[in-house]
Amino acid sequence: MKKIAFFLSAGLTSLSLSVPAMATTKIQWWHAMGGENGAKLEQIAKGFNASQSDYEIVPVFKGTYDETLTGAIAAFRANQQPAIVQVYEVGTGTMMAAQGAVYPVYQLMKDEGEAWDQGKFIAPVVGYYSDTSGNVLSLPFNSSTPIMYYNKDVFKKAGLDPETPPKTWADVEAFSRTIMKSGAAKCGFTSAWISWIQTENLNALHDKPYSTKANGFGGLDAEFTFNNDLTIRHWGNLKKWQDEGLFKFGGPGGGDNAPPMFYSQECAMYMNSSAGRAGVINNAKAFKVGFAPLPYYDDVIPQPLNSIIGGATLWTLKGRPEEEYKGVAKFFTYLQKPEVQADWHQFSGYLPITEAAYKLGQDQGYYEKNPGADIGIKQLTRVIPTDNSKGIRFGNYVQVRGIIDDEFAALLGGKKTAKEAVDSVVARGNEQLRDFQSAN
């Protein structure tokens, strides 16, 4: 039997037992959503619970995405796992490798007699979470993609057209210089997620392979290859622009320092998740916010490809009583309803995961009333994804993102050139891939 390093459990098979039907079967759903989105998530669970009397979904907040995944691993080893756990996109490789621990959603729905049509999902979303045969392994729930936010008032003060955001990186540089020269803002732009936005999406937009084996989708023996001319050039530009004050680093990981620099109008442009739309609007009431796709290098590619997603999906874990799986399948059917998805999308800013939910929003006039709310979905679906733009899938990728942050900091600190920093990311990252491969 193949052993899975993270989800090793000797008592797995003995736990897959049926239990006598009870009046209401409780089903634990571990998640990582706090604040308003967490409250909305609980509201969704209550909606399902009120729609029938056989099952009760019990949401349990487990902290950050890292903490939720780590907690699920520990719980599985102790035979105390929930039926459903929310796992972020960079944990997909880890979950896929745990073949004895996960119950693929396509198989779950089939086994429990629930309707399942993968074709109704938005292709770039569902493709990220599919196996090499095209079968969806986890249910997309909160998907996002990075976009650009910009300050229309600052643009106007600087003599720029507030309705014409920059399209290319040359535009971003030129607009930043104009803005700073005019005194309308102290910096041109900032960004969260050097890894997700300025490295992973950078390569996807320009149709550059991030690794061998179709960006990791083809096997655990993939090797990173993104130390290409494009990544080196872009990291070098970010360093140059930082030195000139055009760009201000938002910090490692999710870049917690980036949002305040945009909200305070210190920086005129800001790149982050489309799911941050509501937060941006709520925190930027002093000025008008514009929304735009991510920029690209038009001398590398005439028109950019699709961006790739972030966010999380819902994984079903094995080892729970059979009766719970009937409830999980019915809950997943409920989550796919257009009205449920459209409401979640419009409240949270996450993307609608089905074509029907997107169309419902159009029919409701939501996008007309909320300009920019569809920028992410249009960017994500503007072309058919290639092997280079459908996403990435690697084990130990959380650690790799930490390495990206380390090496980018070394670049900004003048300790390494762009080539040295990117080459080091790839070399150190490949060590992480080999470690994961050997363990699985």
Image: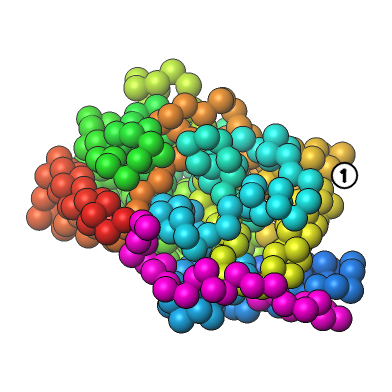
Drawn side of residue 107 relative to residue 200, left or right: right
Identify the residue shown where x is 33% and y is 34%.
213
Identify the residue shown where x is 27% and y is 42%.
221
Identify the residue shown where x is 89% and y is 67%.
51
Instruction: Tell me where residue 296 appears, x and y as whole percent.
Output: 42, 31
Residue 21 appears in the picture as rendered: yes
Instruction: Find residue 212 and report its image quarter.
Output: top left
Q: Quadrant of the C terminus?
A: bottom left
Identify the residue shown where x is 36% and y is 49%.
394
Q: Quadrant of the N terminus?
A: bottom left
The foreground one among 91 and 307 is: 91
The region drawn magenta spans 1-30
The foreground one among 2 and 300 is: 2
Residue tagged 1: 364
Give the overall secondary structure of the magenta segment: loop
Instruction: Find residue 389 and report its image quarter.
Output: top left
Drawn side of residue 341 relative to residue 97, left or right: right
The foreground one among 394 and 422 is: 394
The foreground one among 93 and 422 is: 93
Residue 68 appears in the picture as rendered: no
- 174 in the magenta segment: no
